[in-house]
Amino acid sequence: MRLYSTNNKELNVDFATAVFNSMPQDKGLYMPVEIPQLDADFIENIGSYSLPEIAFKVASALLGDAIPAAALKALVEDAINFDAPARKLDENTYVLELFHGPSLAFKDFGARFMSRVMAYFLKDGEQLLDVLVATSGDTGGAVALGFLGVPNTRVTILYPKGKVSEIQELQLCTNGQNIHAIEIDGTFDDCQHLVKQAFADADLNEKLRLTSANSINISRLIPQTFYYFNAYAQLAREGKKKVVFAVPSGNFGNIAAGLMAYKMGLPVHQFIAATNANDTVPRFLESGVYQTRPSVQTYANAMDVGAPSNWVRIMDLFDDSREEVLKVVSSSRYTDEETLQAIKDIDQQYNYVACPHTAIAWLALEGYKRAHAEENFAGVFLSTAHACKFPDIFPEDIAAKIEIPAQVLELIDKEKGATVMDTDFKNFKNYLLNL
Ligand SMILES: *Cc1c(COP(=O)(O)O)cnc(C)c1O
């Protein structure tokens, strides 16, 4: 596999380089030089393959000889060791549950795959890899649990005090082993600033091998293509081949992966990018003007992104043409009031509890159905997290229905360990040097 930068197509690096750099020097994003086509036979018979089989097939096509087949197969099976069921809610409505991994959010796909890819490329005896992450909630848990026990790696997570949910905090602070959590007396932006300062600090970079596990890493995007193929396979088994995906979007990595699957030959009828009030992309698709804005806080806080970093990847997939994007992607935005009402409606109609992000995807699907009432298609809305991660949003009667999964209940008895720190970089640097 070879990759270029979205800012420079002459650049040409191998997969390992792209994984460890995360971002090219020119501040573009890595994209595959060539998007491989899956053979028509595979797509035609996709219903007969399991998720691990599909994941291996898709990963092999993308990675080429970057990782030998046997090692890649073992890696994929170890990383994607949980299901992604498309649950049928009514004749033509499915919810794709992407929260059955250890941190109960779809980010487990990316984080688990990335950690194992990094571990694979770290040869025995090489310097320990220090992964730094700032998190507002979901990313930290996925990265912590993704790297937990992975040899030759150490993770330091910075999270803002009092600003992550109880379950998110448990996922960050109860791991031990190679995972360290720091509770910063400040905001998410302060956490992110500290991490950026660490990457810019020459002294630190000389002594430690630092890497960022952020969402723009190409090795997080690749495994997210797997579940689109696998969802399509599940619907194909029921004879449904005209499929619409509604994707709750913040940084637009999830839907970028879906569109990459599309470009690899997955015959998806339509993608809908669903956002909260942070509507940079819907505004762009409507007006043709791309203008980022500072993010605003909403109930779907994992989507509170004013400048979605993966959007350039989507434009790259469609030769920088908004018209081409619009042939397969529509978009819509929803307010907090609509989100809350949707949570109630989904509960009423299907006796199903959806997290706020998921509820926004459902709203977008319902909107699309109304606008295309004569068409016959199967709609799939992506459920990106388990409802128990966002307990404060739900009305009491609905909150009471949320079942806490066993892997969370186990955490409650564990000891919480986090280092408390202010926003002074000197202290953070000292901490890293004395790990
Ligand atoms: C990260 C996240 C999103 C947004 O996904 P992007 O890939 O950034 O668009 C949506 N929902 C949940 C629960 C998330 O954690």
Image (cartoon, helix red, strand yellow):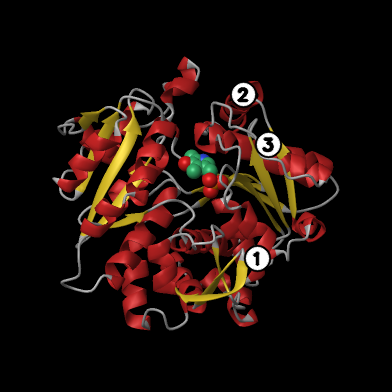
Q: Are marks 2 and 3 in contact (CB under 8 Å)?
A: no
75 or 63, nearer to the observer: 63
Residue tagged 2: 336
Q: CA distance from mark 2 to mark 3?
A: 13 Å
Q: Amino acid type of disc 2?
A: Asp
The mark found on residue 280 in the picture is none
Q: Secondary structure at mark 1?
A: helix
* Residue under the point 50% across and 72% down: 58
Left or right? Give the position of 323 relative to 352.
Answer: right
Q: Is residue 269 above or below residue 143?
A: below
Q: CA distance from mark 3 to mark 1?
A: 23 Å
Q: Amino acid type of disc 1?
A: Tyr
Instruction: Residue 67: give x, y in percent of width and height.
Output: 37, 79
Q: Secondary structure at mark 2?
A: helix
Q: Are marks 3 and 1 in contact (CB under 8 Å)?
A: no
* Residue under the point 18% across and 50% down: 178
Question: Badge 2 local density, few (<14 within 10 Å), some, or many (20+)?
Answer: some
Instruction: Residue 375: give x, y in percent of width and height.
Output: 82, 51
73 or 370, nearer to the observer: 73
Q: Is residue 221 above or below residue 68?
A: above
Asked if disc 3 is less than 8 Å from ligand 1, the answer is no
Residue tagged 1: 262
Q: CA distance from mark 2 to mark 1?
A: 31 Å
Residue tagged 3: 279
Q: Quadrant of residue 243?
A: bottom right
Residue pushed farthest top? 396
Precedes in sequence: disc 2 or disc 1:
1
